[in-house]
Image (cartoon, rainbow, N blue to C red):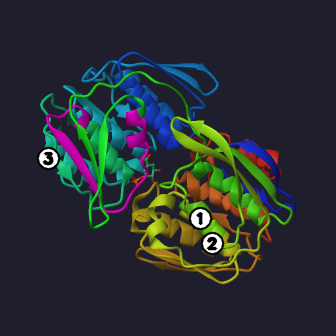
Amino acid sequence: MVWTSHPVKRLAGAIRAPGDKSCSHRALIFGGLADGESRFTGLLEGDDVLRTGQAMQAMGAMVTRTGHGAWEVTGVGSKGLASPKGVLDFGNSGTGSRLLMGVMAGHDLTASLTGDASLCSRPMNRVLNPLRQMGLKDTAGQDGKLPFTLTGSKTLKAIRYAPPQASAQVKSAVLLAGLNAEGETVVVEAKATRDHTERMLQGFGATLSFKMEPSGAHEIALKGGQRLQGLDAEIPGDPSSAAFLIAAGLLSPQGDVTVEGVMSNPTRSGFYDVADMMGAGLGAEERGEAAGERLIDLHAGYAGLKGIAVPERLVASMIDEFPILAVLAAFATGETQVTGAEELRVKESDRIGAVVAMLRVNGVGVEETEDGFTVQGCAGLVPGGGLVETRHDHRIAMSALVMGTSAQKPVSVDDVSMIDTSYPEFMGHMATLGADIRS
Ligand code: S3P
C-alpha cells in the first residue's frame, strides 16, 4: 500500500531512541548460550530481532517477553543448543541468520535456514567460507544463497581469518564459532567494524584480546571453550534509527528534535560526524551508560547543510546510514560524493541503486558509481512529488518518508511494512514530532 509524507513546517519534540538492533540480536543470542538467566530491558521488538529469539527458542533456549521491551532468556550453556524441529525462518535479517550460522557451526546439530526474498538473494559465502574451514558442513552449494541446511561440529578447529569485506557480521560469526572451537580464533580486520560482539561477549564474562598491527589492521582473538554467564542489561538506543529523526530535525524549517539515550560508539558514529562536517551543528549531552556503551541525548535544529566528499575512513561506521545521508545531501548546497561503499550493493536491497532511484524520482540530480554515488544538492528546495520503490528495504522507506517532510511536494513510498523489521515505532515517533504521513 502506498503511503505519502506531506511537507510540514515544524518537526519538534523529544523521542527516546528505540533499542539498538545489533545489540538486541546479540543479547538474545549470547543470553541463550550462557549459563543461567539473563534479563534485558529496552530490547528492540522489531521483526528481525523477534526471529532471532524464535530461532534460539527452537534450538532449546527459553526466551520470554515479560513486558514492553523486557525479556528474559534462560541459556542452555556452551554447546547446549540442539537441532530445531522446523525450518528456521530469519525473515529479512542478515544479522540474525549470519551470527547464528557461526553459533550453529560449533554445535552438534543440523538446522535448515531460510528467509524472505531479500535475504535469500544476499551472499552467505562470506560467512560460510571461514566456517567451512573450521569444520561446518552445509548444502549451500557454490552460490551460497539461502535456503540451505547446516551441520555443526563439536570438534571445530580455530582459525586465523582476515575477512575480505569490512563486515561485523562475518567477524561475529567467526568469533562465535570460535567460542566452541579448539584453540584460539583470530579475526584480523583491515578496517574496524561495529564492535558490539566483542563488547557484549566481555559483558557475558568471556575473555578476548586485541592487538593493533603495524599496518593499522586490528586483531581480535578469543580462546575456545569459554563459558558465558547470564547478564542483566539495558539495551542502548539505536544510532541508526535515531539518524532518521535527527535528519528530520535538520531539514525542518523550524526543526527542534531531541533523541534521548542514543548509543555513542565510534564504530557507529560516522553519520553524525559527516552531518556535522556538512554543517549540522548537532548538540550532544551525556546520558550515562547501558551495556557498557556510552549514551547521549542528541539535538538537531534546522541547518543549511553543504555538500562534502564523505571520507572513506568513515564508511564502515555509517554503513546503514547512507540512504538517509543521501536525503541530507539532496537538501544540501553543492555536491556530496560517496566512494568506497561497495558493501551497499549487498544490503537489504542494492542500496546504491535504490538510493539513486529514490532521489531521481524526486527530481534530485544524482550519478551512480560502482562503489557509491554523487548527489547534486538542491540548496533546500528538493522538488519531491515522486513514488519511491522501497525494494523491501526498511531504510529506503524511512529515508523517503523523511525526505517528504521538507520537500516542495509530498513524497510517497510503495510499501511501509518492512519498517517493522528494525523500527516498529517509526510512524508513531514521526507523528509525535508533527510529521504528516498517511496511507
Ligand atoms: C550488523 C552489521 C552490518 C550492518 C547490519 C548490522 C551487525 O552488516 O549493515 O545492519 O549487527 O553486525 P555487515 O556485517 O554486512 O556490514
Q: Is residue 71 above or below residue 119?
A: above
Q: Amino acid at mark 2?
A: Met
Q: Is residue 40 above or below residue 361?
A: above
Does the Cβ of the disc 1 residue fall within 8 Å of ligand 1? no
Which quadrant of the structure image shows residue 201?
Answer: top left
The secondary structure type at the circle numbered 2 is helix
Q: Is residue 157 shown left or right of residue 285?
A: left
Give the mark nearer the N terminus: 2 vs 3: 3
Q: Gap in Å between the C-alphas at discs 3 and 1?
A: 38 Å
Q: Amino acid at mark 1?
A: Asp
Q: Is residue 218 shown left or right of residue 324?
A: left
Residue position for label 3: 133
Q: Which residues are magenta?
A: 178-202
Q: Gap in Å between the C-alphas at discs 2 and 3?
A: 43 Å
Which quadrant of the structure image shows residue 81?
Answer: top left
Q: Is residue 76 shown left or right of residue 317?
A: left
Q: Nearer the viewer, residue 147 or 106?
A: 106
The secondary structure type at the circle numbered 3 is helix
Q: Gap in Å between the C-alphas at discs 1 and 2?
A: 6 Å
Q: Residue at x 15, y 28 (%)?
A: 154
Residue 153: % across, % down: 15, 31
Residue 252: % across, % down: 80, 63
Q: Amino acid at mark 3?
A: Gln
Which quadrant of the structure image shows residue 329?
Answer: bottom right
Assess disc 2: are there few (<14), some (14-19) or many (≥20) residues with their C-alpha within 10 Å of its C-alpha.
some
Residue 286, label in figure: none
Residue 277, label in figure: 2
